[in-house]
Image (cartoon, rainbow, N blue to C red):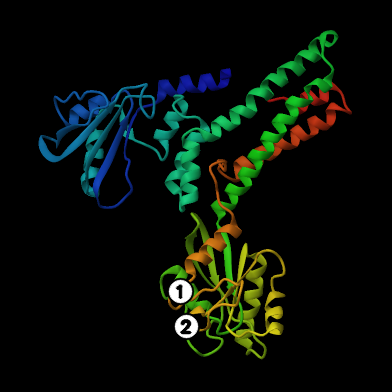
Amino acid sequence: MNRQVLHRVKEFHVEHATIVAIATAPGRGAIGVIRVSGPRAMAVLRRLAPGLTPAPRVATLTTLRIDDAVVDQALVLFFPGPRSFTGEDVVELHMHGAPRLLQLVVQAAGREPGVRLAEPGEFTRRALMNGRLDLTRAEAIVDLVEARSEAEVKSAAARLDGGLARHLDALYQPLLQLSAELEGTLDFPDDAEDVEAFAPVVDRCLVGARQLEASARTATQVRQGGLVVVYGPVNAGKSTLFNRLVGSARALVDDEPGTTRDALEATLEVGGQLVTLVDTAGLREGAGRVEALGMERTRQVLQEADVAVLLIPPGAGREDLETWRAEVTDTRRLEVMGKADLLGAESGTPAVSGLNGNGVEGLMGLISARLGTLDGEALVAGERHLGALTRVRESLERAREALGSSTVEVVAGEVSLS
């Protein structure tokens, strides 16, 4: 830790107050939690529950009072610093989750001298400043709270458990040692080894950097969510299937061809990750002006799709099939027989029925396989980490190239961690 950081930490310890805030989500609920952190945490507790001195890390049932009036019964948890979330004395009040009740208790706590309302994220910031969390874990808390899918939950939880920190440290420590050795080569050139001797270390670090960068790209894609577009001819059953997948009658369904005139979107979870599902206007010759605009919109979203599900109606001819296939000619296309409840499926082609749900689970599995999944190794949070790891990988690639063609100064400059 450099002097500037140490100064900021010391300054933080001198200036900070005891803070209090509601720690649970807004709204009514069975339970609401109020958290107090700082040197006056026990003073706040004694103001609300006179005479109470709870044992550390033991839930204690008590009566809360404001101006001698009983307002609630609560479970109290006391975590003495530094063995607490923030590294300070922390008191948590687990109460009934009435919004007005929680507000009154927070206001009463704020009347204690030296106590103020916490700023957004301040508990986590104090945990970071007091060394209870590193930056990767602090970011993981935010990502876990904001997770919208199973994949995001697992990724954030793994980072909160220190997975990313361990991977980064495994990359950092060899680079730190290598940087020191290269600097020593510059200071004592007579005792220096051949610069090529450093190649194995650079190669190992480069492999690690590439793996983490790939993990970041995967995680970024998962956070953004995949785009799955259902397309095909009119009356193929696209809107019925769309409604089945999203679990509600979002799209109009009718026997008249061309009912869908525009792209209709909904969000759902597929294979643990969030996707945007798009129902599109059917493709056919001789469409009217408005329907033709819808078909143009279909072609636009198909260009952006991660997976394009071609829904084929029973009895489709080979010439028509080739025409629909021509809309998406790469591996993003996934062909599925529609209206399987009527005529079934051709040999070797997956079948699905939006009407009765047959084949839907299999279709979801196929879409998930095409999108890919966020496994336990995809620990990197997203675009900020991706940018940093890309710069590390590029520097290591330049260092590896310089080992055989340039000076030690160039290699040391690329490897330097300053």
Label located before the other in sequence (1 or 2): 1
Please identify the quadrant where the N terminus is shown.
top right
Residue type, mark 1 in image: Asn
Task: Give the image location of residue 355, x and y in percent.
Answer: 44, 78
Vertical position of residue 170 compared to residue 297: above or below: above
Viewer-side residue, 223 vs 12: 223
Quadrant for residue 377, please give it.
Answer: top right
Tell me if residue 200 comes above or below residue 149 in the rendering.
above
Q: Which residue is at the front of the view, 99 or 199?
A: 199
Q: Residue at coordinates 54% horizontally, 22% vertically from top-left?
A: 5
Q: Quarter of the image for the C terminus: give it.
A: top right
On screen, residue 41 versus residue 363, left or right, reads left
Q: Which residue position holds label 1?
A: 243
Residue 232 located left or right of residue 150: right
Looking at the image, which is closer to me, 117 or 401?
A: 401
Residue on which disc 2 sits: 253
Disc 1 + disc 2, Cβ < 8 Å: yes
Residue 165 image-quadrant placement:
top right
Please rate how many residues cluster around mark 2, counting C-alpha atoms within 10 Å: few if below 14, some from 14 to 19, many from 20. Answer: some
Q: Quadrant of residue 118?
A: top left
- Picture residue at 51% right of the left edge, 78% below the top: 340
Task: Give how far across and how far down residue 173 sits, in percent.
Answer: 63, 23
On residue 317, which mark appears?
none
* Residue found farthest to the front: 347
Q: Secondary structure at mark 1?
A: helix
**Which amino acid lies under the numbered mark 2 shown in the image of this protein?**
Val
How crowded pointer 1 is (Cα within 10 Å; few <14, some 14-19, many 20+) is rated as some
Q: Alpha-carbon distance for marks 1 and 2?
A: 9 Å
